Image (cartoon, rainbow, N blue to C red):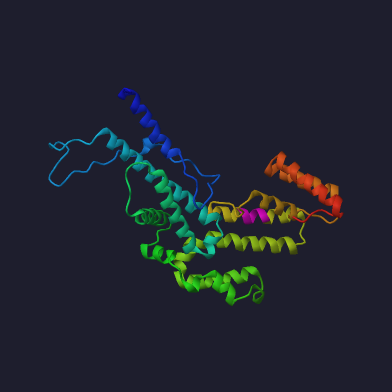
């Protein structure tokens, strides 16, 4: 028989390992920027429950050490599910384009993933009979904490609403009917505001809507501005600073997109292809690193050799 003094350290490692371990994502791929869940040491000790009229000092047999370990495993699994849900919601609000046009479907995917993670991670003997309620409570807690919206608003966001269905809207309205793709989305967003209420939809969707609006303004500016490159770069930096100051994040999802705009803002028809390649390499090396800059340079040199012109950004 293995001495008990050797068993407990192994059980402790199991608890810690469970919290750090992440089951394979059911819906979302793991986030590169996600931070690992906190160790199980940060968990509060499992609460004891006693029948009415009894106390921890009554004659009722004390819970076994094995039961306590199972409770720790269960609590660790719930903590891991809650932290993962928080990470995914943050990713959804800032990067997932479907959130802007399908909030109900996006939130339902989060709930489904939360339920599956709890089932994978909870290797204790606890079997929740209301996984939906647990995950919904976690989601409500996070939404209310960050945006102070009510349960009724969250319920409305989780439900399908025909007037807020983007596919239905796109069937009824063509992008060609509007002056620009942005105008098309603005019309849909107005319809969405009518369904959810402007206060709620603007509180939740404004960062992504403003990012798309800014992207449209930048593209128009790049195409139409005849100002010197230094002035163009200053204008672009001001737009980035204003957005980041307001929302705490840059307005671009990929650094590559930012670099391509920097290149486009400095394009000069009088510059030779060799000098243009050198500028592109310099900016990519600065923002993306030498390896990626060299990969881009090789592809663009090959494109230039085949087609007689540089590839578009």
Front-most of residues 124 and 185: 124
Q: Is residue 23 left or right of residue 41?
A: right
Q: Quadrant of residue 48?
A: top left
Front-most of residues 242 and 133: 133
Queried whether the magenta region covers residue 28, the answer comes back as no
The residue that appears at 42% across and 56% down in the rendered structure is 143
Where is residue 130 shown, x and y percent of the image?
33, 55
Considering only vertical position in the picture, is 267 above or below 33? below
Where is residue 190 shown, x and y percent of the image?
53, 72
The residue that appears at 51% across and 64% down in the rendered structure is 102
Where is residue 73 shown, x and y percent of the image?
35, 39
Considering only vertical position in the picture, is 226 above or below 258? below
Where is residue 57 shown, x and y percent of the image?
14, 36
Q: Is residue 34 left or right of residue 152?
A: right
The region drawn magenta spans 236-240
The residue that appears at 26% across and 41% down in the rendered structure is 47
Q: Is residue 6 visible?
A: yes
Total numbered labels placed on residues in the image: 0
Please identify the residue farthest to the front as the structure is shown. 1
Front-most of residues 268 and 63: 63
Considering only vertical position in the picture, is 232 above or below 190? above
Which secondary structure is most common in the magenta stretch? helix
Quadrant location of the C terminus in the rendered image: bottom right
Quadrant location of the N terminus in the rendered image: top left
Q: Quadrant of residue 261?
A: bottom right
The residue that appears at 86% across and 50% down in the rendered structure is 305
Q: Is residue 272 visible?
A: no
């Amino acid at each position: 028989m293995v001495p008990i003094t050797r068993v407990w350290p192994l059980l402790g490692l199991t608890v810690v390992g469970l919290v750090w371990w992440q089951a394979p994502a059911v819906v979302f791929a793991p986030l590169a920027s996600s931070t690992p869940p906190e160790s199980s040491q940060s968990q509060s000790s499992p609460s004891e429950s006693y029948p009415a009229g009894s106390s921890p000092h009554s004659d009722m047999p004390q819970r076994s050490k094995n039961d306590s370990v199972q409770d720790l495993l269960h609590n660790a699994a719930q903590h891991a599910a809650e932290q993962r849900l928080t990470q995914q919601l943050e990713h959804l609000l800032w990067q997932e384009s479907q959130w802007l046009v399908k909030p109900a479907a996006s939130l339902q995917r989060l709930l489904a993933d939360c339920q599956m993670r709890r089932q994978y991670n909870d290797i204790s003997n606890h079997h929740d009979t209301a996984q939906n309620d647990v995950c919904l409570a976690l989601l409500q807690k996070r939404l209310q904490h960050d945006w102070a919206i009510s349960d009724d608003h969250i319920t409305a966001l989780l439900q399908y609403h025909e007037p807020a269905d983007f596919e239905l809207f796109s069937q009824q309205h063509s992008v060609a009917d509007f002056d620009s793709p942005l105008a098309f989305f603005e019309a849909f967003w107005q319809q969405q505001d009518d369904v959810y209420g402007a206060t709620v939809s603007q509180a939740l969707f404004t960062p992504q809507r403003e990012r798309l609006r800014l992207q449209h303004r930048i593209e128009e500016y790049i195409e139409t501005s005849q100002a010197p490159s230094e002035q163009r770069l200053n204008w672009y930096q001001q737009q980035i600073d204003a957005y980041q100051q307001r929302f705490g994040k840059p307005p671009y999802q990929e650094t590559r997109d930012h670099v391509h705009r920097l290149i486009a803002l400095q394009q000069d028809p009088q510059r030779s292809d060799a000098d243009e390649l050198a500028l592109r390499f310099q900016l990519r090396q600065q923002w993306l690193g030498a390896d990626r800059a060299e990969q881009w340079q090789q592809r663009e040199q090959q494109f230039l050799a085949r087609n007689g012109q540089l590839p578009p950004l």
